Image (spheres, helix red, strand yellow):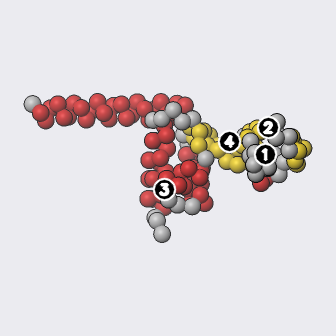
Amino acid sequence: MVAQYEIRDKVLEYIEMLAMSPVKSFYPTAVAKYVNTPVKDIFPHLIDLVKVDELYLKWEVRCPDFDCHQTIGEINDYQKFEEEELSCPRCGTEFVLNEKDIFPRFDLNPSYKEYIRRKNAEKKTLMSTQVSTLQL
């Protein structure tokens, strides 16, 4: 079994890697694959990042038709979703919204992305300066 601090470090490594890329959002399953750990072990670390505004948690509503699975909308607060009749604009499937049709998605805070990019640029500049000094 992997220690929680190792999982946390790998989660942070993945989030920082995403922050350096054009990616704006991701699913917890992607992080779980990267860390090679079940989603249930990843989720608390992602929630910790939501609490400090590095990530935003959104809930996607998806079509229940297995062949479609189109994202239909978004809910900001999972606790406040209401059962309502919906229709998929892609395949036409009509269904009553329930919790099995709602999936978590994490969005990167744009200011956090910018912070990570600046931090990495400063780190590269510092390393270049140190290498230049060593070569003299």
Count of labels in the image: 4
Is residue 135 toward the left or the right of residue 35 in the image?
left
Which of the two discs, 4 and 3, labels the residue nearer the N terminus?
3
- Mark before the other along the chain sequence, 4 or 2: 4
Q: CA distance from mark 1 to mark 4?
A: 16 Å
Please, what secondary structure does the residue beneath circle 4 have?
A: strand
- Residue, disc 2: 90
Identify the mark nearer the N-term, 3 or 2. 3
Labelled disc at residue 63: 1
Which SS class for mark 2?
Answer: loop
Residues under numbered marks 3 and 1 in contact, where contact means CB atoms less than 8 Å apart: no
The answer to which of marks 1 and 4 sits earlier in the sequence is 4
Separation of marks 3 and 2 at Cα, in angstroms = 34 Å
Q: Kindly identify which numbered label has been placed on residue 32.
A: none
The residue mark sitting in front, 1 or 4, is 1
Which residue is at 79% across, 37% downward?
90
Q: Is residue 49 left or right of residue 130?
A: right
| Residue annotated with mark 3 | 35
Q: Identify the residue shown where x is 75% and y is 49%.
A: 67
On the question of residue 23 being in view, the answer is yes
- For badge 3, the amino acid type reads Val
Can the viewer see residue 44 in this picture? no
Secondary structure at badge 3 equals helix
Three-letter amino acid code at the position of disc 2:
Arg
The first of marks 3 and 1 along the sequence is 3
Q: CA distance from mark 2 to mark 1?
A: 9 Å
For label 4, the residue is 58
User: Given the image, on which type of amino acid does mark 4 rest?
Assistant: Lys
Q: Are marks 2 and 1 in contact (CB under 8 Å)?
A: yes
Q: Residues within 10 Å of mark 4 (few under 14, many from 20)?
A: some
Q: Position of residue 64 (x, y in %)?
A: 79, 50
